[in-house]
């Protein structure tokens, strides 16, 4: 299970870097938030900042659940990982129906992998 948690964190870190690039104005918005903007407007940049915080929280919960770190009670990391799994499962159809072809074909497989890894971590 530590391997799944670490793999999950590596992908989340890569996504956090991607979101940071969006916040800083990189013209890669077609891969996120419905792909409607090449460069994200302010409201979506705030959404990207929130996403980074969510990724950090999920990464912390995953590492705690896998006993790599010990920062929250076991019940919190257990329930939190099931919530994270649900979050990623919901992301699958949302990315799959995106109007943006780049987002559909890039982010849908990423979210499927995140869902599978979070399931492995949640199962413990």
Image (tube, helix red, strand yellow):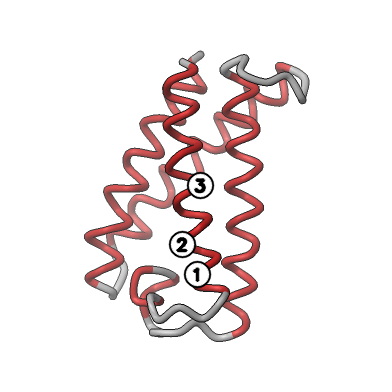
Write the residue at 50% across / 69% down.
21
Residue receiving disc 2: 18
Along the line of sight, which residue is nearer the eye, 116 or 38? 38
Along the line of sight, which residue is nearer the eye, 23 or 112? 23
Write the residue at 45% across / 84% down.
39
Cβ atoms at labels 1 and 2 below 8 Å apart: yes
Cβ atoms at labels 1 and 3 below 8 Å apart: no
Cα distance between the residues tagged 1 and 2: 5 Å
Packing grade of label 1 (10 A; few <14, some 14-19, many >=20) is some
Q: Is residue 9 left or right of residue 49?
A: left
- Position of residue 90 measured from the top left corner of the image (x, y, whole percent): 43, 48
Q: Is residue 119 left or right of residue 105?
A: right
Write the residue at 59% across / 25% down.
63
Residue receiving disc 1: 21
Residue receiving disc 3: 13
- Position of residue 60 measured from the top left corner of the image (x, y, whole percent): 65, 33
């Amino acid at each position: 299970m530590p391997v799944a948690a670490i793999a999950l964190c590596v992908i989340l870190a890569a996504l956090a870097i991607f979101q940071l690039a969006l916040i800083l104005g990189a013209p890669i918005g077609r891969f996120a938030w419905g792909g409607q903007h090449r460069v994200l407007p302010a409201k979506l940049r705030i959404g990207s900042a929130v996403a980074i915080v969510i990724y950090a929280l999920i990464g912390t919960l995953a590492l705690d659940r896998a006993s790599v770190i010990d920062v929250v009670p076991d019940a919190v990391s257990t329930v939190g990982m099931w919530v994270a799994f649900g979050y990623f499962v919901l992301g699958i159809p949302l990315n799959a129906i995106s109007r943006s072809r780049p987002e559909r074909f890039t982010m849908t497989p990423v979210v499927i992998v995140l869902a599978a890894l979070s399931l492995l971590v949640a199962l413990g």
